[in-house]
Image (tube, rainbow, N blue to C red):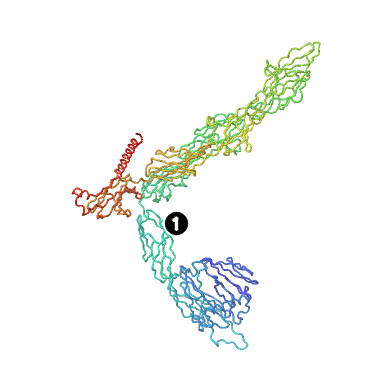
Amino acid sequence: LKICPDMLSTNNIKVTAIHLSCFLQVILVQVNPGEAFTIQRDDGQFQCITGPAQVPMMSPNGSVPQIYVPPGYVQQIIEENGVRRVLVLPQTEDLFFLFVFFSDSKASYCTEFSYTHPPHGRAAFAHRDERASKTYERLQKKLKERHGVGGGGGGGLALSKDSPPPSPQKSRGTPPSGGDLQNGLGGKGADEQAQPSTAVTALGKSPGRGKDTESGDIQARGASLSWVAPSQPEGDDEPKEGEEGPAEPSFTYEVSVSYSGKDGKYKMYVLCVFRVQAMCNCLQGVPSEPVSFTTLSCEPDGPSPPRKASGTKSSLVLQWKAPCDNGSKIQNYILQWDEGKGTGAFEQCYYGPQKQYRLTKLSTASRYYFRLAAKNDMGVSEFSDVVHIMTSCSVPAPPLSPELIQSGVTWLCVRWHRPAGSPKEDEISYVLEMEEEGSGYGFQASYDGDELSHTVRNLHRSTTYRFRVRTHKHTLIPIFRTIQPGCPCRLAVKGKPHPTSFRLTWDPPKDNGGSDVAKYVAELSEGLSGSSWNQVYNGSAMECVCGGLSPGCSYQARVHCISAGGESQLTEPLQVQTPPVPPGPCQPPRVVGKPKAREVRLRWAPPLVDGGSAVSSYSVEMFAPQVDEGWEVYQGSELDCTVGSLLPGRTYGFRLRAANKAGVSRRILSLLPVFGPCCAPPCNGAAVSEYRLEWGAAEGSMQMCYTGAALSHEMRGLLPATNYFCRVQAVNVAGVGPFSDAVLCQTPCSVPAPVSSVHTLREGEDEEDEEARPLLYSSSTCLGLRWEAPCDHGSEIMSYLIDLGERQPILTGPVTKYIIQNLHPDTTYRIRIQALNSLGAGPFSHTFKLKTKPLPPLPPRLECTASSHQTLRLKWGDGPAKAQPTDSLQYHLQMEDKNGRFISLYKGPCHTHKVQRLNESTSYAFRIQAFNEAGEGPFSTVYTFTTPRSPPAPLKAPRVERVDESCEVSWETLPPMKGDPVIYCLQSMQGNSEFKQIYKGSATSYQLPNLSSFTEYRFRVCAIRQCQDAPEIIGPYSSTVILLPPRVDTPGVSGATGSKAAEAQKPNRSLTDEQFSFLIIALLAVTSILIAVAIQYFVIE
């Protein structure tokens, strides 16, 4: 920091240092009102900040930056409430302070302090404001409390009356621990950092050389130094009367240090020597006398992490080196570990002066975390970095050959299996190596980890690679990598294109990528823009027919192929033009206006289908009824004409045809009666009074439909495209005249009739047409519709329109079955259908409500709740174990057999199932599926559960025989269980004590010596299965056998014979379980017989 002279007026500048960490500080520069603070930035520009303000500045090295003050001012460092403040105050006497820190880092620390003296004659505290006065009084008060009035510690002299206030000195009690200081700053945060005070000492004057240097507060990593400026000898260059005194010379000071450390590596408990030297105008004074002192000792430095010296499968030997003791001998080391739990919590496992430790009873191939600390008389050092060390494991067997799972254009996915017989708790790492054919580099590692599959990327196409996987041995397998095939060749049209179809053909690709082409996909786009493409073929053949096209239209076709390596590029689009066809049938002509007696005006509409070519002309032919041949009355491009030279009251037929460059459309016959002012029949002497009109669909079954004097009648309610017959007769006063000849009339064609009924497709109906059924058909998202074709009214039905309400209508072909896809599950839809022909759209059918089924249920999570060596109890879902009558959700449980096929185990609503008759220590794969009324849901992922090893069978009660003062216990022998040996454990209980183990081994008998003659003994035995890669399995204990103490005869019994005495001396043998059971059965039988005899005697008789 540099404070410019124009920054200061009567007030002072306050710089506050706030500690954020041991290497970062924020310096707050307080600018008072009416003052300015100038900062020189990194780009060289100056920035002026006016007060009142607090300017935050960062200190990256963790120390208060050097502040260059203008002449006449001095900086003082004080500490209040853990915050260091640097005050810039006016100066009256040359007094300097320096605080030296010792660093533990390798970088050297240069201590240098420079200051320029202000000229004499400046009044001390000439412009001191209220804040500066309060600060001065507070400093004087603190100084008096610590040093006493009129004296100072450390041999210092009393301060003069006009001297500036010295820096406050911190209490010189017990120095802070060296473990709390790092590089002169607190290692535990700003609140706990130790801030040494500045010592103020007034030394004797030595003209011409710097004043002596004195050390103040001495700590483990720092010390406080102070000195005074040199003074001129009295009487030299005294000013004469009337002359001004010479200017005060400017001094700079250089502090030199000598220490026992080397290369900037400062240590605790070090002898240091300091001296100070004054310089003025490039002239150096004589250095002061050196001052030496010794820093204090502190706790040791943090040690290095322990290392593994040796180890086995169940033990580790750790060693470590002693760190720097910092002046106090290391007494003990503290070693902590996480006990292999991996939770980050450490427990102490060793405390002592040794530099190595052996840990035993560890798990095989397990990871353990350790950390170390050292302790001396001053305290405990910081812990070292955490290091993880693993115990040894057995060398794994070589893995099996890798397999190719999937291949792509530039990648291969390779899988391998865990070595057979390796324990599941062992962590095995694998190294996958790859060799490119013809590269000459051999096998190179492409993966190193514990996964069982890896995808190798950035490979070359059409190249052979070989892979091998190793733990400590290699296995080889050549793998030929498949890649993306090339696009098919020579796409062309086979034969001539038809108006509605053409046949595409192509050749296989020249480069199939190393694998055969599985199928070809042909796509077609209408028009030349190529904006939308539709798939028209998917199969293995190399030709296809593109049908359902429009005549006279342009199409673009393209083909690509698919193999195991992926999809090929698309071929260049092939443009195909379908030939046009004659126009479609025209609508029947209609009469314009009222027909006249001898002429009629006709008008018609262009055909709905032009056949791919514009209509060039129309032709109208007229013919009389019951006459096959007609004559042309009009030909041209207009849409109307007038036909003359007709006879009144006759019916004429007209045929209309349209023509384009492809041909002429088929004729449409229309019978139009020309009524006009018909001529009345001859009256034969009496006027005609009325006419009678008969009308019918057949010539022989006509009915009277009109009677009156009018010469015309309009018929209503007729059917479109239907033939009708009519005849008329006249009536006068003389009687009824004969009928006229029957006239044939045909009504014109019309739009189709409405669809009468709509039904959903049944399960059997949608399976009849496999091609029409979509691949991903689901009753939850699809609706299958079936309807009856309505009457076409003389024009063939071309398509149907299915209206779904809010959704976009669906246009189908001339079919009566259709499956609607992409619907919402469990949703009701309102559906109506409309038929369309060449004349237009017919009316909609009635609205039908159809509902999609809900989605099939997802599979539940499968768990194993209990297991034995022959059974597994499986549970799924959250419902009860027993099914409820209202449960609609059911489950299907399957297990994988030896051939890799899944067989059904259970199908029902329960949530648990017990699988029995399994083999011990065997893994079984299961999967489960849920289904309900909506259908069968997907299968779950495959779950694998393993049965445990079976325990040994229970042994029969052991046999015990007393031999003098000992007894021999023997038991039956069990054969080995699947190669695992069986040992036995014999336990004994003496009196009322607990059972204790007296023997464990493979023998089938044991002799127990030194038996007590007055104690009862109980024995039991069990078998133990010793597994090779698992803990021992203890079987159930046998029944207990009691050994009673021997009976002793009393001296008074003298009349007993020798045989009785011998029998009394024999030990009582306890009954076995079989004997005890037989005795109970005999007692029950005798009791039953006695009860039956009593009932027979007392009750019946």
The residue shown at (38%, 63%) is: 350
Residue occupying the far left of the picture: 1058
> x, y (%) of residue 962?
24, 50
- Horizontally, is 635 left or right of 866 in the view? right
The answer to whether residue 354 is left or right of residue 875 is left
Quarter that holds the N terminus: bottom right
Q: Position of residue 569 (x, y in %)?
A: 52, 40
- Mark 1: few/some/many CA within 10 Å (<14, 14-19, 20+): few
Q: Is residue 367 above or below residue 677?
A: below
Residue 214 location in percent, x, y? 48, 79
Residues 440 and 546: in front is 546
Q: Is residue 402 above or below residue 203?
A: above
Q: Which of the 4 image quarters holds residue 354?
A: bottom left
Question: Which structural element holds mark 1?
Answer: loop
Amino acid type of the residue that numbered disc 1 sits on in the rendered structure:
Thr
401 relative position to 749: left or right = left
Residue 924 rendering spot, x and y as whole percentages: 41, 42
Q: How many labels sit on residues?
A: 1
Q: Nearer the viewer, residue 512 or 1085?
A: 1085
Q: Between residues 693 and 1087, which one lies in front from this camera angle?
A: 1087
Say above or below: 183 vs 435. below
Q: Which residue is mark 1?
A: 343
Front-most of residues 1064 and 493: 1064
